[in-house]
Image (cartoon, rainbow, N blue to C red):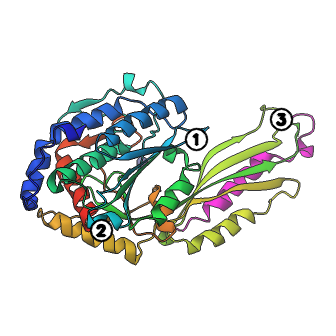
Protein backbone atom coordinates (compact mmCIF):
# COMPACT_ATOMS: atom_id res chain seq x y z
CA UNK A 1 0.00 0.00 0.00
CA UNK A 2 2.41 2.64 -1.20
CA UNK A 3 0.10 5.58 -0.53
CA UNK A 4 0.35 5.18 3.20
CA UNK A 5 4.05 5.81 3.18
CA UNK A 6 4.39 8.23 0.26
CA UNK A 7 5.14 11.65 1.70
CA UNK A 8 3.02 14.34 0.10
CA UNK A 9 5.01 17.27 -1.16
CA UNK A 10 3.55 20.75 -0.70
CA UNK A 11 1.51 21.65 -3.77
CA UNK A 12 3.46 24.84 -4.28
CA UNK A 13 6.67 22.86 -4.69
CA UNK A 14 8.06 22.66 -8.21
CA UNK A 15 8.35 19.20 -9.71
CA UNK A 16 11.42 17.59 -8.22
CA UNK A 17 14.30 17.21 -10.63
CA UNK A 18 14.86 13.75 -12.04
CA UNK A 19 17.70 12.95 -9.64
CA UNK A 20 15.43 13.81 -6.71
CA UNK A 21 12.71 11.66 -8.15
CA UNK A 22 15.07 8.74 -8.51
CA UNK A 23 16.22 9.24 -4.92
CA UNK A 24 12.59 9.26 -3.82
CA UNK A 25 11.90 5.95 -5.57
CA UNK A 26 15.18 4.44 -4.32
CA UNK A 27 14.01 5.23 -0.79
CA UNK A 28 10.85 3.29 -1.66
CA UNK A 29 12.74 0.30 -3.05
CA UNK A 30 12.05 -1.92 -0.05
CA UNK A 31 8.38 -1.07 -0.18
CA UNK A 32 8.25 -1.97 -3.87
CA UNK A 33 9.89 -5.31 -3.07
CA UNK A 34 7.34 -5.91 -0.29
CA UNK A 35 4.50 -5.25 -2.71
CA UNK A 36 5.95 -7.67 -5.27
CA UNK A 37 6.49 -10.33 -2.62
CA UNK A 38 2.91 -10.01 -1.48
CA UNK A 39 1.67 -10.56 -5.06
CA UNK A 40 4.02 -13.49 -5.75
CA UNK A 41 2.91 -15.21 -2.54
CA UNK A 42 -0.66 -15.28 -3.81
CA UNK A 43 -0.50 -18.02 -6.42
CA UNK A 44 -2.66 -17.31 -9.46
CA UNK A 45 -2.42 -19.94 -12.18
CA UNK A 46 -4.55 -19.16 -15.24
CA UNK A 47 -6.50 -22.40 -14.88
CA UNK A 48 -7.61 -21.95 -11.28
CA UNK A 49 -10.45 -19.47 -11.12
CA UNK A 50 -10.67 -19.34 -7.34
CA UNK A 51 -7.01 -18.43 -6.87
CA UNK A 52 -6.98 -15.97 -9.75
CA UNK A 53 -10.07 -14.27 -8.35
CA UNK A 54 -8.37 -13.93 -4.98
CA UNK A 55 -5.43 -12.26 -6.70
CA UNK A 56 -7.77 -9.89 -8.53
CA UNK A 57 -9.52 -8.86 -5.33
CA UNK A 58 -6.23 -8.15 -3.51
CA UNK A 59 -5.09 -6.08 -6.48
CA UNK A 60 -8.40 -4.23 -6.57
CA UNK A 61 -7.99 -3.12 -2.97
CA UNK A 62 -4.36 -2.04 -3.54
CA UNK A 63 -5.34 0.20 -6.45
CA UNK A 64 -8.45 1.45 -4.68
CA UNK A 65 -6.27 2.52 -1.76
CA UNK A 66 -4.65 4.93 -4.23
CA UNK A 67 -8.02 6.33 -5.22
CA UNK A 68 -8.68 4.19 -8.30
CA UNK A 69 -12.12 2.92 -9.18
CA UNK A 70 -12.03 -0.87 -9.63
CA UNK A 71 -14.32 -2.86 -11.89
CA UNK A 72 -14.22 -6.63 -12.38
CA UNK A 73 -14.84 -8.16 -15.79
CA UNK A 74 -16.36 -11.47 -14.84
CA UNK A 75 -15.39 -14.68 -16.57
CA UNK A 76 -16.91 -18.08 -15.90
CA UNK A 77 -13.92 -20.10 -17.10
CA UNK A 78 -10.99 -18.00 -15.89
CA UNK A 79 -10.28 -15.55 -13.14
CA UNK A 80 -11.95 -12.15 -13.34
CA UNK A 81 -10.00 -9.47 -15.16
CA UNK A 82 -9.56 -6.20 -13.33
CA UNK A 83 -9.97 -2.67 -14.66
CA UNK A 84 -9.04 0.31 -12.50
CA UNK A 85 -9.77 3.87 -13.57
CA UNK A 86 -7.93 6.83 -12.14
CA UNK A 87 -9.57 10.15 -12.96
CA UNK A 88 -7.97 13.42 -11.84
CA UNK A 89 -10.24 15.85 -9.96
CA UNK A 90 -12.76 17.42 -12.38
CA UNK A 91 -11.38 20.91 -11.72
CA UNK A 92 -8.04 19.84 -13.21
CA UNK A 93 -7.55 20.68 -16.87
CA UNK A 94 -6.11 17.25 -17.47
CA UNK A 95 -9.36 15.56 -16.40
CA UNK A 96 -10.73 15.80 -19.94
CA UNK A 97 -7.76 14.12 -21.56
CA UNK A 98 -7.99 10.57 -22.82
CA UNK A 99 -6.45 8.06 -20.43
CA UNK A 100 -3.24 6.19 -20.94
CA UNK A 101 -3.70 2.43 -20.63
CA UNK A 102 -1.34 0.44 -18.40
CA UNK A 103 -1.69 -3.17 -19.48
CA UNK A 104 -0.69 -6.37 -17.72
CA UNK A 105 -1.84 -9.76 -16.50
CA UNK A 106 -2.19 -11.26 -13.05
CA UNK A 107 -2.19 -14.93 -14.05
CA UNK A 108 0.95 -17.07 -14.09
CA UNK A 109 1.95 -20.35 -15.75
CA UNK A 110 2.74 -22.00 -12.41
CA UNK A 111 0.33 -24.61 -10.99
CA UNK A 112 -1.02 -24.24 -7.48
CA UNK A 113 1.52 -25.36 -4.87
CA UNK A 114 4.59 -24.21 -6.83
CA UNK A 115 5.65 -21.90 -3.97
CA UNK A 116 6.52 -24.97 -1.87
CA UNK A 117 9.43 -25.82 -4.20
CA UNK A 118 10.05 -22.36 -5.57
CA UNK A 119 9.69 -19.98 -2.63
CA UNK A 120 9.75 -16.23 -2.97
CA UNK A 121 13.21 -15.25 -1.68
CA UNK A 122 15.93 -12.64 -2.01
CA UNK A 123 19.33 -13.92 -3.11
CA UNK A 124 22.31 -11.87 -4.34
CA UNK A 125 20.21 -8.78 -4.89
CA UNK A 126 17.59 -10.67 -6.89
CA UNK A 127 14.03 -11.53 -5.93
CA UNK A 128 13.01 -15.05 -6.95
CA UNK A 129 9.59 -16.65 -7.21
CA UNK A 130 6.88 -17.91 -9.55
CA UNK A 131 5.63 -15.13 -11.80
CA UNK A 132 7.87 -12.51 -10.17
CA UNK A 133 9.19 -11.32 -13.54
CA UNK A 134 6.20 -12.30 -15.68
CA UNK A 135 4.68 -10.16 -14.41
CA UNK A 136 3.82 -9.44 -10.79
CA UNK A 137 6.71 -7.00 -10.49
CA UNK A 138 5.21 -5.13 -13.45
CA UNK A 139 1.93 -4.72 -11.55
CA UNK A 140 3.81 -3.45 -8.48
CA UNK A 141 5.63 -0.93 -10.69
CA UNK A 142 2.24 0.42 -11.84
CA UNK A 143 1.15 0.91 -8.24
CA UNK A 144 4.33 2.63 -7.14
CA UNK A 145 4.60 4.84 -10.23
CA UNK A 146 1.02 6.03 -9.65
CA UNK A 147 1.68 6.61 -5.94
CA UNK A 148 4.85 8.58 -6.70
CA UNK A 149 3.10 10.79 -9.26
CA UNK A 150 0.35 11.47 -6.74
CA UNK A 151 2.94 12.44 -4.15
CA UNK A 152 4.82 14.71 -6.56
CA UNK A 153 1.81 16.41 -8.16
CA UNK A 154 -0.72 16.15 -5.34
CA UNK A 155 -2.77 13.96 -7.75
CA UNK A 156 -2.32 12.20 -11.06
CA UNK A 157 -1.45 14.57 -13.91
CA UNK A 158 -3.81 12.77 -16.31
CA UNK A 159 -6.42 10.00 -16.43
CA UNK A 160 -4.93 6.51 -16.19
CA UNK A 161 -6.62 3.17 -16.82
CA UNK A 162 -5.05 -0.02 -15.53
CA UNK A 163 -6.18 -3.32 -17.03
CA UNK A 164 -4.96 -6.61 -15.58
CA UNK A 165 -6.18 -9.69 -17.40
CA UNK A 166 -6.45 -13.18 -15.97
CA UNK A 167 -6.01 -15.36 -19.07
CA UNK A 168 -2.93 -13.94 -20.81
CA UNK A 169 -0.84 -17.07 -20.35
CA UNK A 170 -3.52 -19.17 -22.03
CA UNK A 171 -4.16 -16.93 -25.04
CA UNK A 172 -6.33 -14.05 -23.68
CA UNK A 173 -9.36 -15.41 -25.53
CA UNK A 174 -11.76 -14.01 -22.95
CA UNK A 175 -10.11 -10.67 -22.17
CA UNK A 176 -9.06 -9.68 -25.68
CA UNK A 177 -12.23 -7.74 -26.52
CA UNK A 178 -12.02 -5.61 -23.37
CA UNK A 179 -8.30 -4.98 -23.91
CA UNK A 180 -8.98 -3.77 -27.43
CA UNK A 181 -11.87 -1.53 -26.48
CA UNK A 182 -9.94 0.08 -23.60
CA UNK A 183 -7.00 0.61 -25.96
CA UNK A 184 -9.24 2.35 -28.50
CA UNK A 185 -10.37 4.82 -25.82
CA UNK A 186 -6.80 5.60 -24.77
CA UNK A 187 -3.97 7.84 -25.97
CA UNK A 188 -1.53 4.94 -25.92
CA UNK A 189 -0.74 1.63 -24.26
CA UNK A 190 2.16 0.88 -21.92
CA UNK A 191 2.65 -2.84 -21.35
CA UNK A 192 4.37 -3.85 -18.12
CA UNK A 193 5.65 -7.20 -19.37
CA UNK A 194 9.34 -7.74 -18.49
CA UNK A 195 12.05 -5.84 -20.32
CA UNK A 196 14.16 -7.76 -22.83
CA UNK A 197 17.37 -9.25 -21.47
CA UNK A 198 19.34 -8.09 -18.46
CA UNK A 199 19.72 -4.64 -19.99
CA UNK A 200 15.93 -4.30 -19.81
CA UNK A 201 15.34 -3.10 -23.36
CA UNK A 202 11.78 -2.08 -24.15
CA UNK A 203 9.98 -4.09 -26.80
CA UNK A 204 9.05 -2.28 -29.99
CA UNK A 205 8.17 -5.37 -32.04
CA UNK A 206 6.77 -8.76 -31.22
CA UNK A 207 6.01 -11.63 -33.54
CA UNK A 208 2.46 -12.71 -34.25
CA UNK A 209 1.53 -16.11 -32.85
CA UNK A 210 -0.68 -18.89 -34.15
CA UNK A 211 -1.65 -22.31 -32.93
CA UNK A 212 -2.73 -25.05 -35.30
CA UNK A 213 -3.47 -28.77 -35.06
CA UNK A 214 -3.10 -31.20 -37.93
CA UNK A 215 -5.11 -34.38 -37.54
CA UNK A 216 -4.42 -37.35 -39.78
CA UNK A 217 -6.91 -40.12 -40.29
CA UNK A 218 -5.46 -43.35 -41.71
CA UNK A 219 -6.80 -46.89 -41.99
CA UNK A 220 -6.15 -49.38 -39.21
CA UNK A 221 -5.02 -52.94 -39.83
CA UNK A 222 -3.34 -55.78 -37.95
CA UNK A 223 0.35 -55.14 -38.30
CA UNK A 224 1.09 -58.87 -38.49
CA UNK A 225 -1.83 -60.39 -40.40
CA UNK A 226 -2.79 -57.63 -42.84
CA UNK A 227 0.08 -55.16 -43.00
CA UNK A 228 -0.64 -54.27 -46.63
CA UNK A 229 -4.23 -53.27 -45.86
CA UNK A 230 -3.38 -50.52 -43.44
CA UNK A 231 -2.59 -46.90 -44.18
CA UNK A 232 -0.59 -45.54 -41.29
CA UNK A 233 -1.63 -42.17 -39.92
CA UNK A 234 1.74 -42.04 -38.16
CA UNK A 235 3.71 -42.49 -41.35
CA UNK A 236 1.58 -39.87 -43.08
CA UNK A 237 1.99 -37.49 -40.14
CA UNK A 238 5.77 -37.93 -40.25
CA UNK A 239 5.86 -36.92 -43.88
CA UNK A 240 3.59 -33.94 -43.17
CA UNK A 241 5.91 -32.79 -40.38
CA UNK A 242 8.80 -32.74 -42.85
CA UNK A 243 6.60 -30.70 -45.22
CA UNK A 244 5.67 -28.33 -42.38
CA UNK A 245 9.33 -27.77 -41.51
CA UNK A 246 9.86 -26.48 -45.04
CA UNK A 247 7.48 -23.58 -44.32
CA UNK A 248 10.09 -22.09 -41.98
CA UNK A 249 11.67 -18.92 -43.30
CA UNK A 250 13.77 -17.48 -40.52
CA UNK A 251 15.12 -14.68 -42.70
CA UNK A 252 11.57 -13.39 -43.16
CA UNK A 253 10.75 -14.03 -39.52
CA UNK A 254 8.42 -16.96 -40.16
CA UNK A 255 8.73 -20.04 -37.98
CA UNK A 256 6.64 -23.20 -37.88
CA UNK A 257 7.26 -25.66 -35.05
CA UNK A 258 5.69 -29.12 -34.78
CA UNK A 259 5.70 -29.11 -31.00
CA UNK A 260 3.60 -32.01 -29.73
CA UNK A 261 2.70 -35.24 -31.53
CA UNK A 262 0.25 -37.97 -30.68
CA UNK A 263 -0.87 -41.09 -32.46
CA UNK A 264 -1.38 -44.84 -32.61
CA UNK A 265 -2.84 -47.29 -30.16
CA UNK A 266 -0.63 -50.42 -30.03
CA UNK A 267 2.60 -51.61 -31.62
CA UNK A 268 0.78 -54.32 -33.55
CA UNK A 269 -1.78 -51.98 -35.11
CA UNK A 270 -1.21 -49.82 -38.16
CA UNK A 271 -2.24 -46.45 -36.71
CA UNK A 272 -5.61 -45.02 -37.72
CA UNK A 273 -5.10 -41.65 -35.98
CA UNK A 274 -2.24 -39.24 -35.40
CA UNK A 275 -1.96 -35.52 -34.81
CA UNK A 276 0.50 -32.72 -34.29
CA UNK A 277 0.13 -29.37 -32.49
CA UNK A 278 1.95 -26.60 -34.32
CA UNK A 279 3.23 -23.21 -33.14
CA UNK A 280 3.49 -20.56 -35.85
CA UNK A 281 5.21 -17.14 -35.63
CA UNK A 282 5.11 -14.30 -38.15
CA UNK A 283 6.85 -10.94 -38.25
CA UNK A 284 4.31 -8.93 -40.26
CA UNK A 285 0.55 -9.16 -40.62
CA UNK A 286 0.74 -9.44 -44.40
CA UNK A 287 2.43 -12.83 -43.95
CA UNK A 288 -0.57 -14.28 -42.12
CA UNK A 289 -2.95 -15.05 -44.99
CA UNK A 290 -0.37 -16.79 -47.18
CA UNK A 291 0.93 -18.93 -44.34
CA UNK A 292 -2.60 -19.82 -43.24
CA UNK A 293 -3.41 -20.85 -46.81
CA UNK A 294 -0.29 -23.01 -47.09
CA UNK A 295 -1.10 -24.76 -43.82
CA UNK A 296 -4.65 -25.50 -44.92
CA UNK A 297 -3.73 -26.74 -48.36
CA UNK A 298 -1.38 -29.54 -47.35
CA UNK A 299 -2.19 -32.65 -49.41
CA UNK A 300 -1.88 -36.22 -48.15
CA UNK A 301 1.09 -38.19 -49.51
CA UNK A 302 -0.93 -41.39 -49.06
CA UNK A 303 -4.26 -40.92 -50.87
CA UNK A 304 -6.00 -43.18 -48.34
CA UNK A 305 -5.23 -40.82 -45.50
CA UNK A 306 -7.26 -37.73 -44.68
CA UNK A 307 -5.93 -34.47 -43.26
CA UNK A 308 -7.73 -31.91 -41.15
CA UNK A 309 -6.05 -28.64 -40.15
CA UNK A 310 -7.63 -26.47 -37.46
CA UNK A 311 -6.48 -23.33 -35.65
CA UNK A 312 -5.56 -19.78 -36.53
CA UNK A 313 -3.13 -16.94 -36.02
CA UNK A 314 -4.35 -15.78 -32.62
CA UNK A 315 -2.13 -12.77 -31.91
CA UNK A 316 -1.29 -10.38 -34.72
CA UNK A 317 2.33 -9.23 -34.78
CA UNK A 318 3.19 -6.03 -32.93
CA UNK A 319 4.88 -4.16 -35.74
CA UNK A 320 7.32 -1.29 -35.25
CA UNK A 321 4.93 1.36 -36.57
CA UNK A 322 5.42 5.13 -36.41
CA UNK A 323 3.17 5.21 -33.30
CA UNK A 324 5.34 2.61 -31.56
CA UNK A 325 8.53 4.48 -32.46
CA UNK A 326 7.08 7.73 -31.12
CA UNK A 327 6.45 6.11 -27.74
CA UNK A 328 9.92 4.60 -27.75
CA UNK A 329 11.47 8.02 -28.43
CA UNK A 330 9.56 9.46 -25.47
CA UNK A 331 10.79 6.64 -23.26
CA UNK A 332 14.35 7.31 -24.43
CA UNK A 333 13.94 10.99 -23.54
CA UNK A 334 12.72 10.15 -20.05
CA UNK A 335 15.55 7.65 -19.55
CA UNK A 336 18.15 10.14 -20.80
CA UNK A 337 17.22 12.43 -17.88
CA UNK A 338 18.92 9.80 -15.74
CA UNK A 339 21.84 9.31 -18.10
CA UNK A 340 20.34 5.97 -19.07
CA UNK A 341 20.53 4.80 -22.68
CA UNK A 342 17.30 2.83 -23.05
CA UNK A 343 17.51 0.21 -25.78
CA UNK A 344 14.79 -1.39 -27.86
CA UNK A 345 14.32 -5.03 -28.88
CA UNK A 346 12.23 -7.11 -31.24
CA UNK A 347 11.16 -10.39 -29.66
CA UNK A 348 9.52 -13.63 -30.77
CA UNK A 349 7.07 -13.97 -27.88
CA UNK A 350 3.58 -12.46 -27.98
CA UNK A 351 1.70 -10.43 -25.36
CA UNK A 352 -1.56 -8.50 -25.12
CA UNK A 353 0.41 -5.61 -26.62
CA UNK A 354 0.09 -7.49 -29.91
CA UNK A 355 -3.68 -6.91 -29.80
CA UNK A 356 -3.49 -3.19 -29.04
CA UNK A 357 -0.74 -2.57 -31.61
CA UNK A 358 -2.69 -4.76 -34.06
CA UNK A 359 -5.64 -2.33 -33.99
CA UNK A 360 -3.32 0.61 -34.56
CA UNK A 361 -3.05 2.06 -31.05
CA UNK A 362 0.51 3.23 -30.19
CA UNK A 363 1.93 0.59 -27.85
CA UNK A 364 5.21 0.22 -26.00
CA UNK A 365 5.95 -3.12 -24.35
CA UNK A 366 8.61 -4.44 -22.00
CA UNK A 367 8.38 -1.56 -19.52
CA UNK A 368 8.20 -3.98 -16.60
CA UNK A 369 10.93 -5.47 -14.43
CA UNK A 370 14.40 -6.61 -15.43
CA UNK A 371 15.36 -10.21 -14.79
CA UNK A 372 15.49 -13.66 -16.33
CA UNK A 373 13.96 -17.12 -16.28
CA UNK A 374 10.33 -16.28 -17.08
CA UNK A 375 8.21 -19.48 -16.86
CA UNK A 376 11.20 -21.37 -15.40
CA UNK A 377 12.31 -22.57 -11.97
CA UNK A 378 14.98 -19.84 -11.68
CA UNK A 379 12.66 -16.90 -12.53
CA UNK A 380 13.90 -13.71 -10.83
CA UNK A 381 14.04 -9.93 -11.01
CA UNK A 382 16.97 -7.59 -10.30
CA UNK A 383 15.93 -5.53 -7.26
CA UNK A 384 18.25 -2.57 -7.87
CA UNK A 385 16.59 -1.91 -11.26
CA UNK A 386 13.17 -1.31 -9.69
CA UNK A 387 13.45 2.42 -8.82
CA UNK A 388 14.40 3.57 -12.31
CA UNK A 389 11.83 1.27 -13.96
CA UNK A 390 9.16 2.86 -11.74
CA UNK A 391 10.49 6.30 -12.66
CA UNK A 392 10.47 5.48 -16.37
CA UNK A 393 6.81 4.46 -16.09
CA UNK A 394 5.92 7.58 -14.09
CA UNK A 395 7.67 9.74 -16.69
CA UNK A 396 5.79 8.01 -19.51
CA UNK A 397 2.42 8.54 -17.80
CA UNK A 398 3.25 12.25 -17.72
CA UNK A 399 4.73 12.50 -21.19
CA UNK A 400 2.39 10.52 -23.48
ZN1 LIG B 1 3.58 -12.09 -19.35
The residue pinned by badge 2 equals 400
- Mark 3 CB in 8 Å range of ligand 1? no
Q: Position of residue 313 (x, y in %)?
A: 61, 60
The residue pinned by badge 3 equals 269
Lower position in the chain sequence, tag 1 or tag 3 = 1
Rounded to the nearest whole Å, what is the CA distance between mark 1 and mark 3?
44 Å
Dot 2: few (<14), some (14–19), or many (≥20) neighbours within 10 Å? some
| 316 and 18: which is toward the camera | 18
Mark yes or no: residue 117 visible: no
Rounded to the nearest whole Å, what is the CA distance between mark 1 and mark 2?
32 Å
Mark yes or no: residue 152 visible: yes
What is the secondary structure assignment of the residue under circle 3?
strand
Dot 3: few (<14), some (14–19), or many (≥20) neighbours within 10 Å? some
Q: In the rendered view, does 142 fall on the left or right side of 222?
A: left
Q: In the rendered view, does 267 fall on the left or right side of 75?
A: right
Q: Position of residue 28 (x, y in %)?
A: 15, 42
Amino acid sequence: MPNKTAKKMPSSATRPAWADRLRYLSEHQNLIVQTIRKFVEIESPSDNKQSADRMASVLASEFEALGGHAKLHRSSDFGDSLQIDFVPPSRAQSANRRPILLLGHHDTVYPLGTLANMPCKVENGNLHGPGVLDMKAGIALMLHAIAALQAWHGGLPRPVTVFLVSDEEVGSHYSRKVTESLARESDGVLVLEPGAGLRGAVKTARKGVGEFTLQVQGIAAHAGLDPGKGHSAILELSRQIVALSKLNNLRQGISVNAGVIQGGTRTNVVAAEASVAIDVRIKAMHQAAALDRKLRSLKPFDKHCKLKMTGSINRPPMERTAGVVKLYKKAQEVASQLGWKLEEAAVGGGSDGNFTAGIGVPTLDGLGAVGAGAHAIHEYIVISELPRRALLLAGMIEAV
